[in-house]
Amino acid sequence: MKRSIQLATLLMATGLVAVAQTGNTRMYRSGGEWVQEVRGTLPASKIVKVKSSAGSIRIQGGSQPNITYLIRERVRARTEEAARREINRMKFTTFSSGGAVLLKAECEGEDGGSIDFDVQVPRQTTAVKLETNGGQVSADNLAGKVEASTGGGNIHLDKIDGAISVASGGGQIDIGNVGNDVAVSTGGGNIHIGSAAGRVVASSGGGDLHVGSGKLMTLETGGGSIQVNKCEGQIKAETGGGTIDLSEIEGPATIESGGGGIKVGAIRKGLRAETGSGPIIATLTRGTSFTDSRLETSVGDIIVYVPDGLGVTIRAAVEVARGDGIRSDFPELKITRSGNIGPREVFAEGSLNGGGPVLHVHTATGNIQFLKVSKQ
């Protein structure tokens, strides 16, 4: 009985496609390609899946009660007759079962070709899953969660209320406003995220990362830069060689660059920042939540801005000093130097504003400055 129901559902879905291809199709030439458009309608479903072996996918939520789609089957051929033969080798199917709808395209034949999807769904669709082996993916105005992957194309998502999980083999990823968690990865493209109401996890093989705002963040790139405007909680940022620029950090931060400069501020809690070569600039914020911290660079200067009222204990060292080595706006910080000839080691230790958590500051070659916030 159950098998009969499934078979009937499959036949019904196939029938819908057949009607769409017969009554709602048109073919035309566009440049060096022949394009056949197919339009169709499916009942609304909680879960919508779109899969293409080659081609772009675009899905958009709206107020309509059902699912509508437009597919474009593209091939290269000299004549319309040859184009139709190639298109007939393509497979486009739909399937509906158990609250899920699947739209699937497979491209075969000598040319291979591609099939692009343009799908409209009810905005309240619970979940959307998009997959293409090669092509761009975009989704907009959806209340549910979105999963998307492409073998190498760009990904663009905006106005998504649910959680997002997307991956590209090497394209760029652009995420607008998201009302939940975000997890994105690309083999080498840039990543831009406007705002996320939840946690942000982003990684790129070598592109730049730019995040407007989020609650918690884990950011990683093989060699690009990282920029964050605001993080409401803990953040971890790592790059193989680019710069890192973080602003308005409410939680503790762990930052590492293989060879770029680091700038952080204002930060309320603990900070651990390390770079193989480059300057570090950190702006601390007054409060009671600051914890033990460490700033370290092998080659570069370090500047720390300390506000009035923040109790902190300083322990700083310069292995090979240029000039004074360490300079401070705070008289309670004791600075000592070893030797008067050749490269000198310089140390500083003391309690600012009554002391508190320990801040270790170290550079092998460079200068260190402790400045009052008002002197930025």
Image (cartoon, rainbow, N blue to C red):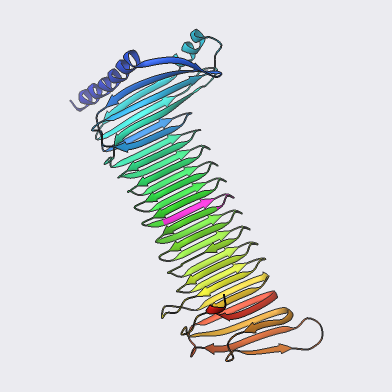
Q: In this view, does 236 lie to the left or right of 243?
A: left
Q: Farthest residue toward the right?
A: 341
Quadrant in the picture for the C terminus = bottom right
Q: In this view, does 297 lie to the left or right of 287?
A: right
What is the count of numbered marks?
0
- Considering depth in this image, is 101 or 172 the residue closer to the camera? 172
Instruction: State whether residue 364 is above or below residue 155.
Output: below
Q: Farthest residue toward the top?
A: 81
Name the residue rendered at 31%, 23% in the picture: 40
Determine if the magenta segment contains residue 201: yes
Quadrant in the picture for the N terminus = top left
Q: What stretch is highlighted in magenta?
A: 200-208
- Considering depth in this image, is 335 or 64 the residue closer to the camera? 64
Q: Is residue 135 left or right of residue 48?
A: right
Name the residue rendered at 65%, 83% in the picture: 327
Name the residue rendered at 37%, 51% in the picture: 178
- Considering depth in this image, is 30 or 20 the residue closer to the camera? 30
Residue 192: x, y in percent? 49, 50
Residue 199: x, y in percent? 40, 57
Name the residue rendered at 47%, 61% in the picture: 229
Instruction: State whether residue 10 is above or below residue 331.
Output: above
Residue 215: x, y in percent? 39, 61
Instruction: State whether residue 249 is above or below residue 95.
Output: below
Determine if the magenta segment contains residue 83: no
- Which picture quadrant has residue 26? top left
